[in-house]
Image (cartoon, grey):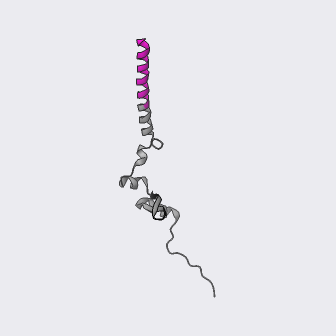
Amino acid sequence: MAERMAHAIETTNLADILERVLDKGIVIAGDIQIRIADVELLTIKIRLLVASVEKAMEMGINWWEGDSYLSSKVKEAELEKENKILKEKLDQLEMKIKAK
């Protein structure tokens, strides 16, 4: 008898799976609790969301826009604020020097 290999009618590659996950989004959630004699010592809540940027923004998730490590606009705004504070302090020091 000749052995035959079974072939899948429809193959799905990793890129297709990733595209579907990013398009729809997937949430993985779990809690870890450490208890001794009915006394809760530690609770760790783990939440993982895997989605495309567009899908995350549709869901109202956009924390990266306010993170200075990820957004150059936020970094620039922080630098401008810091520069303004430093200029004000410099002006105050110059006024004290002139007053003497």
Q: Position of residue 54 (x, y in %)?
A: 40, 53
Where's the C terminus, which quadrant? top left
| Displayed quadrant of residue 2 | bottom right
* Residue at image point 39% right, 56% down: 55
Magenta: main secondary structure: helix
Q: Position of residue 68 (x, y in %)?
A: 45, 41
* Residue at image point 45% right, 64% down: 38
| Displayed quadrant of residue 76 | top left
Q: Is residue 6 magenta?
A: no
Say which of 21 and 97 sits in front: 97
Q: Position of residue 10 (x, y in %)?
A: 49, 72
Q: Position of residue 64 (x, y in %)?
A: 43, 47
Q: Seen from this angle, which residue lies furthest front?
A: 37
Residue 72 sits above or below residue 93 on the image? below
Residue 36 sits above or below residue 1 on the image? above
| Displayed quadrant of residue 65 | top left
Question: Viewed as shown, does residue 3 lie left or right of 60?
Answer: right
Say which of 63 and 86 sits in front: 86
Q: Seen from this angle, which residue lies furthest right?
A: 1
Say which of 59 and 6 sits in front: 59
The magenta span reads 82-100
* Residue at image point 40% right, 16% down: 95
